[in-house]
Image (cartoon, helix red, strand yellow):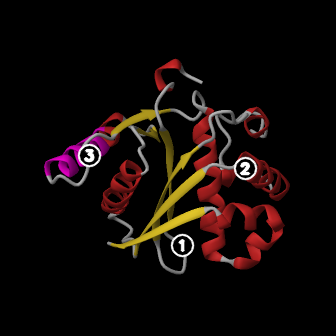
Amino acid sequence: MNKHFERQIIAWGDESIRISAPVPTYLMAATILPNDCDLAHLASLKPKGTIKLHWRELTDKVRLEAITEIAKIGGQTTIVAAAPLPKKKQERGRRKCLELLLPELERLNVSTLVLESRMLKLNEKDIEMLHALRVQNIVSNIRIEHAHASEQEQLLVPDQILGAYGDYLNSNDESARWGQSWETVLSKLTIMETEI
């Protein structure tokens, strides 16, 4: 683990946009991992030639293995679902998710939310949103930082959880393939919903 992120309560975050879902939705997840968790096996599932482990690029067999591993790892995950999401309002969906997620994480004593990095201008929009919430006294101490999943394997966990959850929203038949492991992961999720 990067020393920069040691000795604080960190939530690791990612997003998933589901335009083709029955109700188009912007999803954002933040996971607080156990201090002693070992992510080596999960990271090893990355297909050859890819930068990171990404749900959409995995076969059904590897998805099952990833969900099984996440069920073993444990942790605490909060998902915010913002809907209905207009095709050209994705950043609004992200802001609505952060508006709910950041105060919830602060309530859980999280000091930093590490989000998967996007383009610099988009990362700056996340920081601007945080400052706006501070001005409104919605949050006070929590920070946002950005990192690449290829460098911070902790970001693989919310990616996989969101990928599975998005598929679950689209079709319960899809998630039935993941068996008891998915039921274990699903039972530990906190789901928050907001309108766009």
Magenta residues span 124-135
Pointer 2: what residue? 70
Pointer 1: what residue? 20
First reached walking from the N terminus: tag 3 or tag 2: 2
Quadrant where the N terminus lies?
top right
Q: How many residues crowd around disc 2 within 10 Å: few (fewer than 14), some, or many (20 or more)?
A: many
Q: Amino acid at mark 3?
A: Leu
Q: Give the camera-side residue of 177 and 36.
A: 36
Q: CA distance from mark 2 to mark 1?
A: 26 Å
Q: Is 129 included in the stretch rendered in magenta?
A: yes
Quadrant where the C terminus lies?
bottom left
Q: Amino acid at mark 1?
A: Ser
| Residue located 22% across and 51% down the image | 133
Label ID, residue 190: none
- Residue 94 is situated, as x and y percent measured from the top left of the image, at 36, 57
Q: From the viewer's perspective, is 117 left or right of 164?
A: left
| Residue located 42% across and 43% down the image | 110
Q: Is 9 included in the stretch rendered in magenta?
A: no
Q: From the viewer's perspective, is 53 left or right of 166?
A: right
First reached walking from the N terminus: tag 2 or tag 1: 1
| Residue located 62% across and 65% down the image | 165
- Residues under numbered marks 1 and 3 in contact, where contact means CB atoms less than 8 Å apart: no
| Residue located 68% across and 41% down the image | 53
